[in-house]
Amino acid sequence: MRYAKFLQAAKLDQAAIYQEIVDQHRDSIKAKKDQTAVKNLELIFEATLEVSNRKGFTAMTMRDLSKASGLSMGALYDYFASKEELLAMVQRTGRAVTSRLLKQGLAGIEDPVERLTQAIRTHVFLSEAMRPWFFFSYMEARHLGDQEKERAKKSEMSVESMFAGILRQGQAAGVFKKSDPLLTAAVIKAMVQDWYLKRWKYVKRRVSVNRYADQVRDMALSFCLADKSEASV
Amino acid sequence: MRYAKFLQAAKLDQAAIYQEIVDQHRDSIKAKKDQTAVKNLELIFEATLEVSNRKGFTAMTMRDLSKASGLSMGALYDYFASKEELLAMVQRTGRAVTSRLLKQGLAGIEDPVERLTQAIRTHVFLSEAMRPWFFFSYMEARHLGDQEKERAKKSEMSVESMFAGILRQGQAAGVFKKSDPLLTAAVIKAMVQDWYLKRWKYVKRRVSVNRYADQVRDMALSFCLADKSEASV
DNA sequence: GTCTATAGTGCGATAGAC
DNA sequence: GTCTATCGCACTATAGAC
C-alpha cells in the first residue's frame, strides 16, 4: 500500500480528534459551545506543535503561544490549567490517535512477511501524516510528569511488542531466521523513527516517504530472511 | 574488537580534553592557573550534562548548575559569558573528541565488510563511552544559535558520508549489492544512534554494548550482502 | 467568551566584598 | 579566585472589565 492510499484509508479527521478532546475535558474547558471549543483547541494545539517543534516546549512562552494561536493569554487558560497540563493533553491526544490507527492497519493480515511490511509502512506513513505530533512526543517526553511519562513509555513498549510479535510468529513458522525478537524489533523501530526525527534531511535529499518505507522494509526483511545458517549469536 | 579493547585503544583522557578547552578559551576564563581552570571546567561540564540530560538544558537554571557543580553562580560566570555560550562550548567539545576518535578507528582497514563492521562498532562503542555527551548533543542541538547549529549539522553529515563512502567502495568492488549509499548510510546511522537515545531500555533488558553492535552489524551486512538479484528500486 | 493589565515568582547576569 | 547579595527583566497565571 502506498502513502496516498494509506491517507484515504486512515481518514485522519482533524475535527473529530478535537471534538474528542473537548468531550474528555468538558468540565475544565470554559467555552460552552462545542464549536467554539473545537476551533480554539485546534488553534492552540497547532500553535503548540509549531512553536515547540521549533524552539522546544520549555523555551516556548505563553506569550509565544498567544501570538501563534491568535488567542490572548487569558483565553488560553480557559482551555488548560497550566503549561504542564497543556503538554500532557497534547501528548495524550497524539498517543490515542496513533494507537487507534496502528491497530487498524494490521487487521486481517496473516503472512509474517506481509505483516512485517505492513507494520513498517503503517508506522512510517502515520509518522509522516502526523509528523508534528510524533516529533513533539519524542522530544518532549522527558518534560512530562512521572505519571504521564510512565504512560508514554508503556505506549512505546506496546508498539515494540507488536513488532516483536510479528518476528516471533515468523520464526515459529520457520520463515524468519532465529534472532532475539525484542532486540530486532527495537532496531527496526529505530529505523522507522528516523523518518520523523531527521525529516529535514530526507526532504532535502528528495527521499519520498514511500521510498523510505521500502528501504526500511528491505533492510528488515533481508535480515529476517537471510540464510539461517548464517545466524549469529 | 570488543568494547573493552576499544576503551584501551581510545585513551579517552578526561584531563587532556579539559586542558584543550582551557587553551582555547584562555582569554575569557578568569582563572589564571590551568590546574584550577581544568578542575572547575570538569565540574561545570559534568554538572551541565547531568542536569541537562535529566531535565533539559533550557529547564536547567544557573542555580541548578551552581548546586550540581559546587561552584557559586558568580564563579560559574568566570568560565563562560552566558548560558548560551556554555551550551555551545559543551557541544563543540563533544564534536571535537568524537571526530578525532572516529577517524582514528578506521585507519588501516581496507576490506569493505571489515570497514563497515569497524565503523559500526567504533560508533556504538564511542557513544557508550561518552554517552552523556552524545545524548546532550542530540537533544539540545536545536537550542544552538544558527552558526553552531550549522556546524553540528555538518558534523553529522560527515559521519554519514563516512558510512556512505564505505558502502560505495563495497559496491564498486562488487561485494555489496547496489543501493542508494546515502540512504542506506542514513538508516544504519539511525540504528547506531538508538543505543544512546534509548539506553535505559537496553540496560533494562540487559543488552550489552557488544551484543547491540553485533545486531546492528548483522542487520547492515545481511542487507549489503544479500543476493544481488533481489536488489530493489 | 475574550480581552487587557498586572500580581507574584524566579530567571540570567553582575557588582563588589573578601 | 570565589562568594553573597541583588538588579532588572520576563515568566506563568489570574483578576476583573467588557
Image (tube, coloured by chain):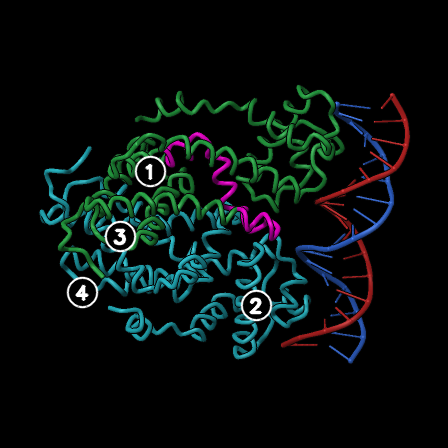
Chain colours: A green, B cyan, C blue, D red
3D distance between C-alphas at marks 2 and 3? 33 Å
Disc 3 chain ID: B
Q: Amino acid at mark 4?
A: Gly
Q: Residue at x 11, y 41 (%)?
A: B228
Camera-side mark, 4 or 1: 1
Q: Are marks 4 and 3 on the same chain?
A: yes
Badge 4 crowding class, 10 Å Cα cut-off, few under 14, some 14 to 19, many 20 or more, is few
Q: Can the viewer see residue B228 in this picture?
A: yes
Where's residue A128, x and y in %? 41, 32
Q: Can the viewer see residue B158 in this picture?
A: no
The residue that mark 3 highlights is B162
Q: Are marks 1 and 2 on the same chain?
A: no
3D distance between C-alphas at marks 4 and 3? 15 Å
Q: Amino acid at mark 3?
A: Met
Viewer-side residue, B162 vs A49: A49
3D distance between C-alphas at marks 1 and 2? 43 Å
* Residue A15 falls left or right of residue B211: right
The residue that mark 4 highlights is B108
Badge 3 crowding class, 10 Å Cα cut-off, few under 14, some 14 to 19, many 20 or more, is some
Circles 4 and 1: CB atoms closer than 8 Å = no
In the image, which residues are magenta?
A: A122-151
The residue that mark 2 highlights is B44
The residue that mark 1 highlights is A120
3D distance between C-alphas at marks 4 and 2? 37 Å
Disc 2 chain ID: B
